[in-house]
Amino acid sequence: MEPFASGITTAVCSIIGELPEFTHIVIHGFRNCIDNIDNTKKRFPAGVSFIEWKNADREINLVKDWKAYKELKAILKPYSLKNQKNKFVVHLHSSKAGFIGRFVCRCLGIKSVIYTPHCGAFLRTDINFFKRNLYRFFEWVGGCFGGRVVGCGPSEGELYKNLGKNTTYVSNGVKLKEIKEIKADRNLVSFTGIAWLQKAPALWNAVAKNCFIPARDNGFSFYWIGSGPWENELEKEFITVTGWKSAQEVEALLLKTSIYFSTSAWEGLPYGVLEAMNCGCALLLRNVPGNRELVIPGENGWLFNTKEEAKNKLEVMLKDKTLLAKMGKNSRKLIEQSFSLKQMGDGYRKIYLSY
């Protein structure tokens, strides 16, 4: 994995926790905008080994990418030797690891390769048309090196099928929380995550600002649970920005949240939304791949395309706490049916054992 942060780390931790019968070695880069390496390692189950992939970087850089290739090749070479007694699977996470990792495995003759994009780079909206298509081309080339694409949800699986790749999917999942009752007295409209371009904090701020008075009149407050480099786009007059919180503190805030509101510009299958659903929140999500399979319109929330549409739907939702509690219950049911940690573990176990 190139990133050692955010939802990708959560996914890898979840897979490892559900597959204790395997020995796990995590080869990781690092993005230092969230936490340090030692704290991130503490999130993993005991017994996991770590190898730092020092030259892995998110953006294209020919010099660093060549060094990352040579570094990863040296790390994986012992597993390609003919006298290797134990079966193994190389599971690549995110676009950069997917491309370099599949090339390395092709060079070393390693065929037991899985690639989970967690939202392909060609879906990014912060780059121009040419660069998006360049990333799409890289995904196609990476697929020519071999391996199997395992999307983190139905939308991602379908996107990569359209690229003509050997593709399936295993939906991300969360451990079911014990919730006795989803009451109508919750009073937060919240979001959890990094305040940076992908999460579109300026749009989140604009909608919150426009809906501040009806929210206040109906007893609601806006909370951005997290922090990040674009935090200054969230006006503290209208929004409480909590900074980074422990998992227990985040859960406590989600249990007070009635509406989970996301303006993310692109997603794989977001853990923030899954955890909100797990806590019984109604959803108001931007209509992008990864969000779409989590919303049944009118049942557990709504999707929106524009700022005006988000504002209008949020104003309607704020007026009916009883309906929001019902939507929250439906979110929880959807998690139990399709996005549990057990189904995620069972799905990857089946794929790993197929090699």
Image (spheres, rainbow, N blue to C red):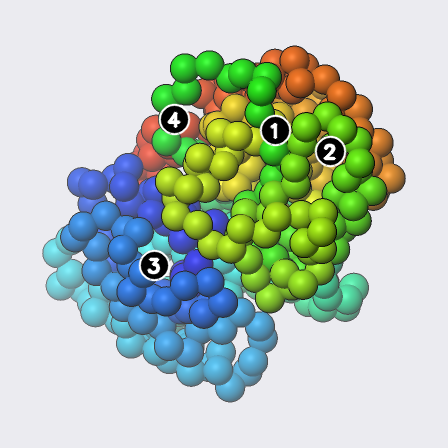
Q: Quadrant of residue 297?
A: top right
Where the N terminus falls, by quadrant?
Answer: bottom left
Q: Position of residue 78 (x, y in %)?
A: 21, 69
Residue at the (37%, 77%) spot, across then down: 54
Q: Residues within 10 Å of mark 1 (few under 14, many from 20)?
A: many
Amino acid residing under circle 2: Arg
- Residue 276 at least partly seen: yes
Residue identifier under label 2: 216
Amino acid residing under circle 4: Leu
Q: Is residue 151 left or right of residue 301?
A: left
Residue identifier under label 3: 40
Q: Which mark is residue 176?
A: 4
- The residue mark sitting in front, 1 or 3, is 1
**Of residues 3 and 64, which is closer to you in this image?**
3
Q: Which mark is residue 314?
A: none
Q: Position of residue 281 (x, y in %)?
A: 57, 27
Chain-order first, disc 2 or disc 4: 4
Residue identifier under label 1: 187
Chain-order first, disc 1 or disc 4: 4
Asked if 54 appears above or below 46 in the picture, the reply is: below
